[in-house]
């Protein structure tokens, strides 16, 4: 249908059709509303990008959790008690270091 028409010819036809269907007074209002819609879309896109960046920064700033490589099924109660004791000893040493530095 539009095979023989140049892009400028198609544009002129669309403008004339818009004038016929909407009238000269409605076209500025239509374009104004389209401009507002595009502005709201850009605003929403920017806000979502900022939110994504904040979420990525929050995830990166959280300390990495070390996963235990030992399977929990093979660990006995006495091994767990030993690990707890070692951790408590390390905690006490750290507290002593902090008090001596203060």
Image (cartoon, rainbow, N blue to C red):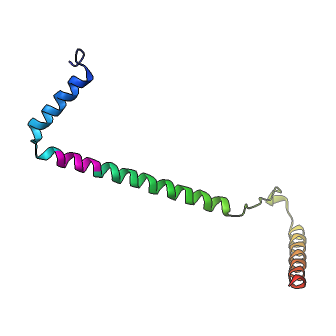
Is the stretch drawn in magenta largely helix, strand or loop?
helix
| Residue 42 percent across, percent down from the top left | 39, 50
Q: Which corner quadrant of the image does residue 99 belong to?
A: bottom right
Image quarter where the N terminus lies is: top left
In front of the other: 99 or 83: 99
| Residue 51 percent across, percent down from the top left | 51, 59
Indicate whether 70 appears above or below 10: below
- Please check the rendered image and state whether residue 95 is part of the magenta-colored stretch, yes or no: no
* Residue at image point 90% right, 84% down: 100
Q: Which corner quadrant of the image does residue 70 belong to?
A: bottom right
* Figure disc tally: 0
* Residue at image point 14% right, 36% down: 18
* Residue at image point 89% right, 74% down: 90
In front of the other: 6 or 67: 6
Q: In this view, does 45 lie to the left or right of 37?
A: right
Q: Is residue 98 left or right of residue 35?
A: right
- Please check the rendered image and state whether residue 30 is part of the magenta-colored stretch, yes or no: yes
Range of magenta residues: 28-35
Indicate whether 21 appears above or below 63: above
């Amino acid at each position: 249908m539009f095979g023989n028409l140049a892009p400028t010819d198609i544009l002129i036809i669309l403008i004339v059709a818009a004038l016929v269907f909407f009238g000269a007074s409605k076209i500025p209002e239509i374009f104004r509303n389209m401009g507002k819609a595009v502005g709201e879309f850009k605003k929403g896109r920017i806000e979502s990008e900022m939110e994504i960046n904040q979420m990525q920064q929050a995830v990166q700033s959280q300390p990495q959790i070390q996963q235990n490589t030992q399977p929990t099924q093979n660990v006995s109660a006495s091994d767990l008690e030993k690990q707890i004791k070692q951790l408590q000893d390390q905690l006490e040493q750290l507290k002593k270091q902090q008090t001596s530095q203060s």
